[in-house]
Amino acid sequence: MAAIKPSVPKGTRDFSPAEMVKRNFIFDTIKGVFRKYGYQQIETPSMENLSTLMGKYGDEGDKLIFKILNSGDYLSKVDPQNLGTLNSNLVTQDISEKALRYDLTVPFARYVVQHQNDITFPFKRFQVQPVWRADRPQKGRYREFFQCDADVVGSDSLLNEAEFVLIYDEALSALGLKDFTIKINNRKVLSGIAEVIGKADSIIDLTVAIDKLDKIGLDGVIKELLDKGFTDADIEKLKPVILLEGSNGAKLASLRSALEASAIGLKGCDEIETVFNYISKFKIQRATVELDITLARGLNYYTGAIFEVKTNEVAMGSIGGGGRYDDLTGMFGLKGLTGAGISFGADRIYDVMEELNLFPADANQTTRVLICCFDKEGEEYALPLLQQLRTGGINAELYPAGAKIKKQMEYANNKNIPYTVLIGSEEMQSGLLAFKDMASGVQQKLSATNIVTQLKSN
Amino acid sequence: MAAIKPSVPKGTRDFSPAEMVKRNFIFDTIKGVFRKYGYQQIETPSMENLSTLMGKYGDEGDKLIFKILNSGDYLSKVDPQNLGTLNSNLVTQDISEKALRYDLTVPFARYVVQHQNDITFPFKRFQVQPVWRADRPQKGRYREFFQCDADVVGSDSLLNEAEFVLIYDEALSALGLKDFTIKINNRKVLSGIAEVIGKADSIIDLTVAIDKLDKIGLDGVIKELLDKGFTDADIEKLKPVILLEGSNGAKLASLRSALEASAIGLKGCDEIETVFNYISKFKIQRATVELDITLARGLNYYTGAIFEVKTNEVAMGSIGGGGRYDDLTGMFGLKGLTGAGISFGADRIYDVMEELNLFPADANQTTRVLICCFDKEGEEYALPLLQQLRTGGINAELYPAGAKIKKQMEYANNKNIPYTVLIGSEEMQSGLLAFKDMASGVQQKLSATNIVTQLKSN
C-alpha cells in the first residue's frame, strides 16, 4: 500500500492529549459556572432536518450549511428535470434532507418548541457542542468548532442579564484572565437614537457605522454616515451620543437627556439602569463593566440587552457575546417566548490563555507516577504498588517490563509525568524504592506505602 | 407561520437535562478510570476525508457511512457521463469528498499515522465522541451514538490486556453494577482449534457456529457445522473443546492437551495464561473473569486477546468488548504497530442502570437551592445571599420576583431542587429565613449564614 500520509479535511482539527487537557479545563470551568447559576445541560443531535435549519441564517448562511447526502440510491428519487438543469440548489432538495447544525441557537429553539410540554419555564439551559460551517478556513476560523452557550427562555426579568455579567466575570476570572471588559448596550437605545434624529428606518446603516468607531475613528464614522444619506444636522445630533464619556452613570444620564423625546429610547435607558442596579448588588471579581452604545452585534436578532466581552491583555476579537431576543421560538410557531443568552468563544479564550501562559502548570499532566522496572521480576514486584496507587485515586502507570530505563524515563518526560518509581534488585531486597521528582531531579528511597501517602498528600 | 411541530431526524436524539446528568455520570466515571490507568484523551474531527473511511468497513459498512455534500455549486464539478448513468455510487465520488466518522478506530489509526512523529509510544489514548451510521433505526440502535474507546498502540505486553480487565472491573463497579462477566478468549486458540481438526481454512465457519452455542445449544451448533461441510469425525474432536467446563485453570489445561499439536494454539494458551496470571496479582472488585472459547467477536480484526462484557443482572447484549489487533495502522501505510483496545457500550450501560435503578438519587439535581421571594423588596434582600451561596460553591438560583410562590415551588419540584429559601416581610425583619427541605417538607428558620453553612456541610 502506498504510504500516503493521511490528513484531516481542511478547516478541521485533531486535538492531542495536551490540547484536550487544556480544552477540558476551559469547558469544565465554564460548565461549572453555568451550573452554579442554575443552567442545565442539554445536547441536541449533530444533524437536523434541513427544513429546521434553512432560512434561519440568511442566504449566505444557507450556503454555509453542510448538507448530508441521503443514504442508499438517492439519485433514484431525484426529479430528472431538476437534475437536467445542473442547478445545485434545486437538486440539493432532492438528494439531501439532513444537515449539520450551524449553531446551537436554532437547535435550541427547535428543542424548546418540540419539548415545550416537558419543560418548566423559565428554562435555563446550557449547551457545549461542535457546530459546522462551510466557511473558507483561515487563521482562527474553523469549519468545525465548539460553541458554548447559555440561554434562558420564558423570563423577562433583567436579573438574567445581570447574572450573565456575573457568569462572564466568574468564569473568565476562574480561567485566570485578569483584565477584561464586559460591554453592555441595549437595542432599544439604538432604536431611540435613530428615532430622535428622525431616521428610524436607517437604524441598520446607523449602527453599522457607529459600531466601527473603534476601528475607523469619529471622522471615518461621519464619512460613512454622510455616504449613507445622513445630513450634517443628523450628525451634529448624533455626536454627543456617539462620544459619550465618563462613568456608566454619567453616560446614562447624558443618554437619557439626549433620548428624552423617544419612548423606546428611554425604555432602553431604564433597562440598562436596572441591569446596572442589579450588578451593583454583587461583588464583581475582575471584569470592567461598561456601557458602550456603539455596540451593535447581531442587531437584527436582539431586542433588548446586547453584550460583548473583550480581553484587555492581548489583541483579540471578542471572546464572548449575547443579548436578549423577544421571539426566538417564533420561527417554529411558538410565539411570545422571550429569552436571553450568552456565548463563550472557546477557541479564542484558548489562544488568549496560551499567549498569557494561564494554563495551570499541571494542566499537561494526566499520569501522576510511572513505575519503572528492569525485568519481569521487578514488574511482578510492582503490581501491588500499582494497584495501591490507583486505589488511592492516583493516576499511575507501569511501563511494561523489558524496555531500557532510559526509554522509560523519556516516556515519563514526554508524557509530562511528574514522579517515577524505580524498582531494581536492590530496591526489591530492601523494600525501599527509588522515588524521583522528575522536575527537581530529587530522589528519595521510600517504602511503597510512603510513596502512596506522599502522592496522596500533594 | 404554520405551527408544524419540529422534530429531529429519525435515529437521532435530544438529551434533556435529566438525561445529560446521567450520561455525564457514566462518561465521567469511565473517563476517570481511563485516566487512572494512564490513558489520555484525544478528539478527532467529526468529518474525515471520504478516502480515509471508504473500504475500511466492508461493502455494507461503506453504504452506512453518511457522506457530506460538497459545498457551493457541486454539480458543476460532476462528470455529466456519470450523472447520466443515474448511478448513485458513481456520482457520490464527484459530489462528496467528506463523510461523518463511522467509528473511533479508523480515525484513531489515521491520527496515529498522521502524528506519529509527535507521539511517544506506547501510546495509550481514550476517545469519547459520537459516531454516525445510516443504519435502519430500531430499539436501542441509533444513527448517532457515542463510542467510548481506550486503545494502546506500540506495546505487545500482555499487561495491557490484564489492565483492560481491571478497567472494566473498576468502571462498571463504580457505576454500581454488581454482577457482570468479563469473557476472554484468544484468536490464536481459535486458529489452533481449526488447525487440529484440519480445517484451518474454515475458521470463520467454525467460529461463527460455536459463537452461537449460548443461543442454539450444542445440537444446533453441530447441525450448522455439518451443514457447512464439517464431518462427524471433526465434530467428535471439537466437542470436548466446545464444552470445556470447570475453572479457568481447568479449562486452560484441557485446552492445552487438545491443542498440543498446534503451535499457534499453544501460543494462544500461553497468552491467556499470562493474562490470567497478571490478573491474579490484582484484587478484582465485582467482575467474574471467564475464559470462553466460544467468544469470536470481530474475528477478522483481532489477532490475540478477545474481550466481551455482559451484565448478569438484566437481559442485555454485550456492554463492552475489544481485543488485540496486530496491524491497525497498516491501512494507512504504517506497518508493524501492534495494539489492543476496548470499548464501553454507553447506551446499553445507561439502559442497564435505569432498569436497576443505579443512578445516584441526586443524579437529577443540578441546582441545590432556590431562593423564593414575594416582591422586588425580597428580591433585593436576597441578592447578597445568592452570591454568598455561589461563592461557597453551591449551585443556587433566585426565582425572579413577581411570580406566585406556588409557581416558584413547582419550579423547584420540577427541577428537582432539594432546598428552598423563602423570603417574606417577616423573614426580612427578623433576618431568619424559611429554609425548607423539599423532600421531607421540614422547614427551619435560619440566618443566611447558617443556611450557607448547612448547605456546604451536606
Image (cartoon, coloured by chain):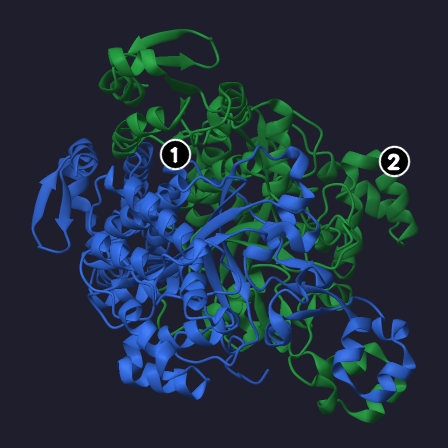
Chain colours: A green, B blue
List x then y, in percent, for residue A166: 45, 38
Amino acid identity at mark 2: Asp
Q: In which quarter of the image is the N terminus of chain A?
A: bottom right
**Are discs 2 and 1 less than 8 Å apart at CB?**
no
List x then y, in percent, for residue B7: 51, 77
List x then y, in percent, for residue A402: 46, 28
Q: Is label 1 in a helix, a strand or a loop?
A: loop
Q: B331 and A417: which one is in front?
A: B331
On screen, residue A30 versus residue B401, left or right, reads: right
Q: Which residue is drawn at 29% across and 26% down?
A: A381
Dot label at residue A219:
2
Q: Distance between the residues labelled 2 and 1?
A: 39 Å
Q: Which residue is drawn at 34% across and 7% down?
A: A444
Q: Mark 1 points at which residue?
A: A281
Amino acid identity at mark 1: Lys
Residue neighbourhood size for the residue with mark 1, other residues' Cα within 10 Å, grouped as few (<14), some (14–19), many (≥20): some
Dot label at residue A244:
none
Q: Tell me the quarter of the picture where residue B52 sits.
A: bottom right
Q: B364 and A200: which one is in front?
A: B364
Q: Is residue B344 in sight in this rendering?
A: no
On screen, residue A73 versus residue A383, left or right, reads: right
Q: Relative to A310, say whether B113 is above or below.
A: below
Q: Is label 2 in a helix, a strand or a loop?
A: helix
